[in-house]
Amino acid sequence: MKKHIALIQGDGIGPEIVAEAKKVLNQIAQLYHHTFTYEMVVMGGCSIDLFGEPLTDEMLEKAKNSDAVLLGAVGGDVGNSKWYQVPPQARPEAALLKLRKELHLFANIRPAYLYPQLQNACPLKKEVIGDGFDLVIVRELTGGVYFGNRKTETINGITRASDEMAYDENEIRRIAKKAFEIARKRRKQVVSVDKANVLDTSRLWRKVVSEVVKEYEDVTLSHMLVDNCAMQLVKNPKQFDVILTENMFGDILSDEASMITGSIGMLSSASLGEGTFGLYEPSHGSAPDIAGKNIANPIATILSAAMLLRYSFDLEKEADCIEEAVSKVLDEGYRTADIFTEGCKLVGTEEMGTLICNYLKEHNLKYG
């Protein structure tokens, strides 16, 4: 198989973690006789420094012309960075919103899985997590308050700001279908999260989702208010299979879910459209405070690369091998600083990537 991948290193730890994911992809290509070519795309704060804007049209076209996009992270220290002394549409994160919109990526898929090896790193009590949990958050990505009309005005000396949260039924219907299709491949349970006791958008959301589920008679649907869902995630995460929700709620809940897995450095994500094209990135940010120190956890980006192989290239076996390699390296006690506990072996970013590659080679030689 020949495929072309756009690589966006981005800011902060982005270049370090993307380098390790690329190393793993190259190992897979060598072992399974694929050809992956790469195109570097500059985006985020580094693009502002070079071109004066977070994402140029030329770079956007490079991403569009690829078979899939692998992203590190964008942004910097909001309090101190020069990138934030400008309007919101000129900041690094605006590039990510633009990329998602222009690539028509409306569905964000974020698995939250507690590796048995990391149960001691989970902030929840053992009686809460039991033998672990395995859930997926399906977040609508191109609508809602992040893309609604916004306005700041001063009247009679008083400044007022507003952000519009808007959805139409077609936007809700397509993300609901994505969630139900994912649930069919898992435990066939979907919890749709909204704020229908207050918001009109949520009442429409609940109505449309309840209609769509009629096409999926094998899937069980329930509804939950977002504040209750936030509580239930830390009270009993095992109850969830697939969580379906709108843009802002999904942004918040997926970060909460990532932390109860032990570290946000373990969480991959995929942003998908109607076809096979996708954008793959870790759930964490750019972590500028540890950039360049070879201590960042590359596993979330490596697992995002596995999702890329599975969802965009239909390479299930290769994706499974990466996920198994990550699990085996954790079995052997290797940890980056964010997931380190007493008795484990502390390694850096590069060494973690190398260990995963080494397991892939040894596994391939042993099992073929």
Image: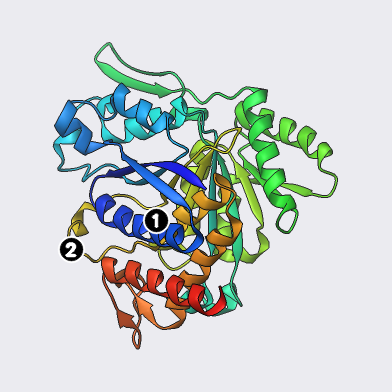
Q: How is the image coloured?
A: rainbow
Tag 1 residue: 301
Residue type, numbered disc 1? Thr
Left-right relation of 111 to 79: right
Q: CA distance from mark 2 to mark 1?
A: 17 Å
Is residue 355 positioned above or below 38 on the image? below
Q: Residue at x 54, y 33 (%)?
A: 106
Q: Badge 1, how many Cα within 10 Å: few under 14, some, many 20+?
A: many
Residue type, numbered disc 2? Lys
Is residue 185 positioned above or below 74 on the image? below
Q: Residue at x 54, y 44 (%)?
A: 312
Residue 82 lies, in percent from the top left, at 14, 36
**Considering the numbered disc 2 on the image, is that residue within a helix, a strand or a loop?**
loop
The reply to whether dot 2 and dot 1 touch (C-beta < 8 Å) is no
**Considering the numbered disc 1 on the image, is that residue within a helix, a strand or a loop?**
helix
Residue 126 lies, in percent from the top left, at 54, 79
Left-right relation of 142 to 78: right
Q: Residue 196 occupies which quadrant of the picture? A: top right
Q: Residue at x 58, y 65 (%)?
A: 235
Tag 2 residue: 293
Is residue 49 positioned above or below 187 on the image? above
**In the drawing, what numbered circle is on residue 180?**
none
Depth order, front residue of 175/158: 175
